[in-house]
Image (tube, rainbow, N blue to C red):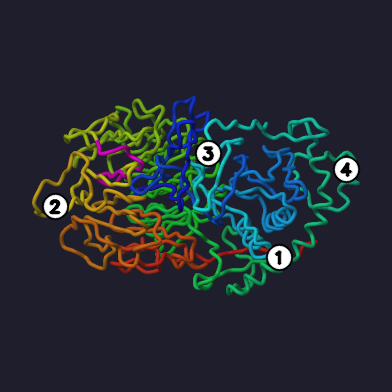
Amino acid sequence: MNRAYRPIGVLRVRWHTPEGRTDRLWRPPDAARRGRAGGPGGHGGRGAHHGDGLRGRAIIPGEARGAALVSRELLFFWSGYDPATGDIVDCCHPLSGANAAGAILAVLLSRGSSTTTAILLEAIRAGTVPAAILTTGADFFFALASVVADELCAAPLPLCALAGADFARLHSGAAIHLTAAGVVEVELGSRALDIAPSSCYIRGRRHAAADLPRWSRSPWELDGNRALSSALPHLPPCLAGLERRAAMSRHMLRVVFFLMFLVLLCLGGAPAVPVSGGEPAAPFLMVFPATAGGPEAPQAILTIAMDAGYHHSCLINAAHEVLCWGANESGQLGNGSTVSSSSPVRVVSLSEGAVAVSAGGAHTCVVTTQGAAKCWGAGGSGQLGDGKGTSSSRPVAVSGLSGGVVDISAGYAHTCAVLDSGAARCWGAGGKGQLGNGAGSSSGVPVTPTGLTTNVAQIGAGEEHTCARMVGGGIKCWGDNYYGQLATGNRNFSLTPVNTVAMGGAAAQLAAGTFGNCIRTAGGGVQCWGFRAIVGDGTNVCYNGVGSAGDPWVTSPRWIANMTSGVTDVAVGNAHACSVKDGGAWCWGDGREGQLGNGQTPTLEVCTPVGVTGLSSGVVRVSAGKFHTLALMGGGGSAAGIRADDLGVRAWGKNDQGQLGDGTTARATTPVQVIPPAVRVYLPLAVR
């Protein structure tokens, strides 16, 4: 359980040196100066993986080469991108004045709607389009432009989605090679491109946005009036093409909107009046019920992150919305109520969107697109981090973490995060030392674990212990050690981080569970320690808490049977663990609630991994809750049988509080589909 951002696919960074090519984590220059070479990752199933390369999803596969052009801000293409030249002409955008034609453009997402598609299509036709686009989500309008370009011009625009933490490591000027297989190669020594923020080229000089007239600092607020240039005779060059682009776009937009309207109707949408309850007002709304779509329909609500908590689950969709389902007695679903739900509901008051999510005991936390930490749900132990010590059914800001957060992990009643500086922060319950600051007491605001001010790559919070993966692949743990959770060779607890005993290789991923942990090594093997049920070493002496042979604890890492290579993901729950090997899902340990997914409910633990029924391929991520498990499907949709009405998430195990998200409370011993809420698509009635 307890995992953060779960992106899809693999993007590997390769450094080219005179001595040859080596695979390692890309470290941007500013991180190198801080001595930090790693990034955040999943734990227990939570966190973006690092160590063997960046991870993302090739939304539209393709090969491209070019210099990186990177911005942390959304790009408004209409009035912001000139399709005739490829110039970025949005005066208030950090990339203003840069030319994106032939570059690898990296932006969080597009700022706009189908106008983005129209501008990109025109740029593709004119040959001024970027060589590829890297984003933090499956942007529908980017993808639509690429699909149409492929159909009409046989010239798809490669599009890849990265985890927010991985995206933060990109820098302008790096020479990038994106292969058709989804591998990103970055040449060592690429010079970073210095682009002044909020600047604009005017008559050959660069001007700060603050020096421009007020109207020129917000070009996206202009309405495209054809008389704009005559009303503003001193329009700077970065806006001078607005009139021409507005005229050019107007007829294209009519065509695009008409085509989208036909597509929506074909998918089964029905016009409806604007809905209430917090939904934005729109002149035209189409609502797609959960049963809409067909096998060949486009995947409109792709899941880019997921996590299984104790009795609830959450995901992030391509629009960076957070959806949660299951138990809600403390408001952990974040929808403003305390009523449980057996199907996903949208988290409210989270307008900036999220890039990472972690579901804990009865609370949930996210990293927003702005790098802030926010939490909701149970807060009596201070696990929400706002200093109040009370529960909240809506997201609240974590004190002091309004930016720079790259990883987050929610345990039973405490939470931890990693900053872009490589420092760790923890807050909430601390009676067993799980905050790591030596105090042995709780804290309602973030504190720093002793010695962890840099070089932390990933963090994982269990029930009353915490572990961190360090740059270089080492593991440090602290807190409760009754079951050997700290991997120190003994059962002595620690109020501060301690090194684990020697492992069989550098850790590329850390997975923290309730009473134990697992790592995925750089060689693709799995080692586990702690509560014996998760240590599936094939010896048939798993401890079931009733009387099986052997002690219930394992104080040092052990290899998992048949999991010594080929593993790409691992997750740990309460007393079971799961992994992804060669595209298939495998589980071991306690299966009495069906959480192993093999169609059985054994009375004793299963000490050797078993295959999950129906998931022998197409799986890219797993996440283990207390008595249930989630799997995230991939393969571009068709390979995994994913439809437009499918979130791409499968679930199995205990379901008494709706934590499987299939609309029922019936236990499932084999995977069931998590059903999506209604998909709402807003379209204007007309384009002037």
> Is 519 covered by the magenta stretch?
yes
Disc 2/disc 3 C-alpha distance (Å): 44 Å
**Magenta span of residues:** 503-520
- Dot 1 lies on which element? helix
Residue 457: x, y in percent?
Answer: 40, 36
Mark 4, mark 1: which one is toward the viewer? 1
Disc 4/disc 2 C-alpha distance (Å): 79 Å
Amino acid type for the residue under numbered disc 2: Thr
Amino acid type for the residue under numbered disc 1: Phe
Identify the residue position indicated by label 1 in the image: 257
- Dot 4 lies on which element? loop
Amino acid type for the residue under numbered disc 4: Leu
Question: Residue 190 or 269: which is nearer the viewer?
Answer: 190
Disc 4 or 2, which lies upstream in sequence? Answer: 4
Identify the residue position indicated by label 2 in the image: 539
Q: How crowded is mark 2: few (under 14 residues within 10 Å), some or many (20 or more)?
A: few
Identify the residue position indicated by label 3 in the image: 186
Residue 572: x, y in percent?
Answer: 29, 50
In the rendered image, the residue lying farthest to the front is: 19
Left or right of 367 on screen, residue 257: right
Confirm or deny contact between disc 2 and disc 3 (CB under 8 A). Answer: no
Disc 4/disc 3 C-alpha distance (Å): 44 Å
Residue depicted at x 25% and y 39%: 504
Question: Residue 455 or 184: which is nearer the viewer?
Answer: 184
Disc 4 or 1, which lies upstream in sequence? Answer: 4
- Mark number, residue 232: 4
Residue 280: x, y in percent?
Answer: 63, 58
